[in-house]
Amino acid sequence: MKEKDFFNLLIRTYRTDTGTDPAEYSMGAYLDVFLHAYPEEKAQVRLTRKTCARILHEFMKNVLGYPDIDWDRAKELKDIYDCKVCANSIAQVYERGIMAEYAPGVFGLEKIVSEEEARAYIEVIRGYM
């Protein structure tokens, strides 16, 4: 699955489930890029687990209004700090059970998310809407 396709599916699911459009207001700097200024040259960029975690976390925080929770099990992920910008996003979706480890003790930041996995993550998020 491509990054932009995942974002669009998440927004469509939210619109369908809630009858409201999150695009009517700012979703935060990170998500607003996907909505208004996603670079054409990135159209074919495949969705990695770290980007998926960041999109889901920013959506939960900025659209759904969920506050961050304390880290517990996420501290034990061997690769949690391989991306300092997305470490908290990874921890938030991991702690909430939205995304599991890729392998024991490893989140798998650069692993590609399949369409099936992406849809499964969105199904979990639906429970938070």
Image (cartoon, rainbow, N blue to C red):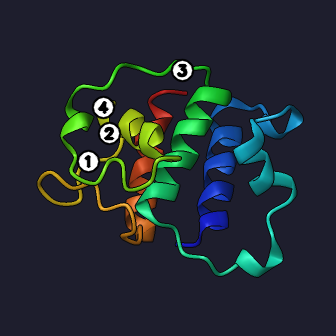
Determine the CA span between mark 3 and mark 4: 13 Å
Determine the CA span between mark 3 and mark 1: 19 Å
Q: As shown in the figure, which amino acid type bears the numbered disc 4? A: Glu
- First along the sequence among labels 2 and 3: 3
Q: Mark 3: which secondary structure?
A: loop
Residue sitting at x 36%, y 37%:
91
Residue 19 in the image: x percent, y percent?
A: 74, 32
Residue 10 in the image: x percent, y percent?
A: 61, 49
Q: Which residue is mark 2?
A: 94
Q: Quadrant of residue 20?
A: top right
- Name the disc covering residue 90, or none: none
Task: Report crowding for label 3: few under 14, some 14 to 19, many 20 or more residues within 10 A (C-alpha).
Answer: few
Residue sitting at x 39%, y 53%:
120
Determine the CA span between mark 1 and mark 4: 9 Å
Q: Which residue is mark 4?
A: 95
In this rendering, would 32 be left or right of 89? right
Task: Report crowding for label 4: few under 14, some 14 to 19, many 20 or more residues within 10 A (C-alpha).
Answer: some
Determine the CA span between mark 2 and mark 3: 14 Å
Q: Which residue is mark 3?
A: 66
From this view, report whether residue 57 is shown above or below residue 13.
Answer: above
- First along the sequence among labels 1 and 4: 4
Residue 95 in the image: x percent, y percent?
A: 30, 31
Instruction: Name the one closer to the observer, 15 or 5.
Output: 5
Q: Check if mark 2's residue and mark 1's residue have beta carbons within 8 Å.
A: yes
Q: Residue furthest left?
A: 104
Task: Report crowding for label 2: few under 14, some 14 to 19, many 20 or more residues within 10 A (C-alpha).
Answer: many
Residue sitting at x 32%, y 39%:
94
